[in-house]
Amino acid sequence: MAALEPGILNSTQQLAASRGVDLDALPEHVAIIMDGNGRWAKSRGLARLLGHREGYKTLRGVLLNASELGIRHLTVYAFSAENWRRPQDEVDGLMKLIERAARDELAVMHRNNVRVRVAGRMDEVPASLRQALLDGIETTRDNTGITFTLAVNYGGRAEIVDAIRRLVESGTPASEITEELVSRNLYNPDLPEPDLMIRTAGEMRWSNFLIWQAAYAELFVTPVAWPDFGLDQLVEAVATYQQRVRKFGGLA
Ligand code: FPP
């Protein structure tokens, strides 16, 4: 789904290039806080769950677009460790929607060479959802295309706590605990840290998403609600990212 052959661009790449995107300097890892489903639904007089359903459709398109563009890793915040506080019908609806998506999209993701991952406390999600996610990981484990990580029951602080627990359980002496060792004990230690963090629907916060890994991520916030997000906004985010000067605490 990425470049057809060296030098031949697919239509997504052509569009991005025409808008100033340097295809040789793409962010390797893009993370997205998919916010605004509820407001999108409310503004149309619809139930919140219909906003989430529309958000699912958006996600299918964005995964395809990101893959066609040549982005290597995409991570999305599907359900936070704090989202359990929502009304029970919304929680149940989201769980079912994510499970349905995991099952219904598996064949097409596999065909498209997508490698599925999850991030979050899987032991706390319904067993049938956990199984659907594990099936996705297992089926696609050897794929070489875009890595698509679904953050489900995910909290950045919980992830750090889980990493520290693992280190303590393995008897690691305190003096040996380094940033690198903590990183190696996160949920997906083989993934590079996100370069670009996109948040939709205008809020300017991290909401506990990848707080360790996103220490040096560039943040792009769009007022567009997630159900209305599309290729135009993805390309705008990447183009904006490419205008930033990343210094990692040093000098430009
Ligand atoms: C935030 O919008 C969004 C979520 C809590 C859930 C994200 C879920 C999806 C995009 C759909 C399903 C995902 C998959 C993987 C199939 P919000 O409800 O907080 O919006 P609001 O701030 O406007 O109320």
Image (cartoon, rainbow, N blue to C red):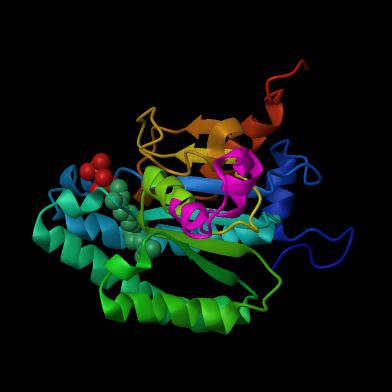
Q: Residue at x 47, y 49 (%)?
A: 164
Q: Nearer the viewer, residue 97 or 80?
A: 80
Q: Residue furthest top?
A: 251
Using the image, determine if residue 20 lies above or below residue 87: above
Q: Position of residue 140 (x, y in %)?
A: 59, 79
Q: Nearer the viewer, residue 244 or 186?
A: 186
Write down the region rendered in magenta: 165-187
Q: Position of residue 90 (x, y in %)?
A: 16, 59
Using the image, determine if residue 252 lies above or below residue 40: above
Q: Residue at x 28, y 79 (%)?
A: 127
Residue 195 visible (yes or no): no
Using the image, determine if residue 133 lies above or below residue 237: below
Query: What predominant SS class does the magenta segment belong to?
Result: helix
Q: Nearer the viewer, residue 228 or 81?
A: 81
Residue 116 visible (yes or no): yes
Q: Position of residue 181 (x, y in %)?
A: 62, 47
- Tell me the quarter of the image containing the N terminus: bottom right
Q: Is residue 107 left or right of residue 165?
A: right
